[in-house]
Image (cartoon, grey):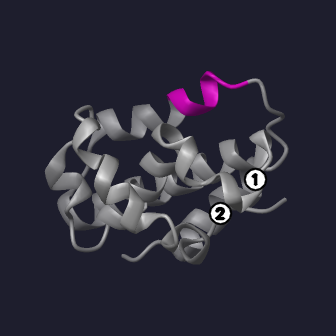
Amino acid sequence: MRLASDTDLASVVPRFEKVEPRLTAYRADMLDHPIAGKCLRNFVILTECPELFGELGLSEVERFWSRYYWLARFAREWKAAVGDDAGLEQQVLQLLEHTTVEYDPLPEVDAAAARDAVL
């Protein structure tokens, strides 16, 4: 299974900056964080801006697990930089609770988020 990488998503970042103002549900301090912010931005692109990533060719399952990866990685990096955030950890779990995809990739995706997180 393929996860959307930072390299994959880099091509849509300039276009994301044009739609970012409409995304009022996300905290600016989190999106602007010098380390963790990139992860949240990638999660937001995959979640809120499907028109931006169409050329990546992700299946719906790959898109879900990419979203989960970037949110789980963001949660790890945010915790390392700022401290515990129970609401953020709950959001990661809720993402899993509200899906119909198979959970088989979960250990692999969790391991990738842990490995790749900048702590």
Q: Is residue 76 visible?
A: no
Cα distance between the residues tagged 1 and 2: 8 Å
Q: Which residues are magenta?
A: 94-99
- Examine the rendering and report whether any part of residue 109 can be seen: yes
117 shown above or below 45: below
Q: Are marks 1 and 2 in contact (CB under 8 Å)?
A: yes
Residue at horizontal 32 percent and vertical 65 percent from the top:
36
Q: Earlier in the sequence, mark 1 or mark 2?
A: 2
State the image coordinates of residue 75 (x, y, percent, origin top left): 39, 53
Q: Relative to residue 103, is residue 83 drawn left or right?
A: left
- Report which residue position mark 1 lands on: 58
Q: Nearer the viewer, residue 99 or 8?
A: 8
Q: Main secondary structure of the magenta part?
A: helix
Q: Position of residue 111 (x, y in %)?
A: 66, 64
- Please give the residue where the numbered disc 2 appears in the rendered image: 4
Image height of 102 relative to 68, above or below: above
Between 106 and 58, the one lying in front of the other is 58
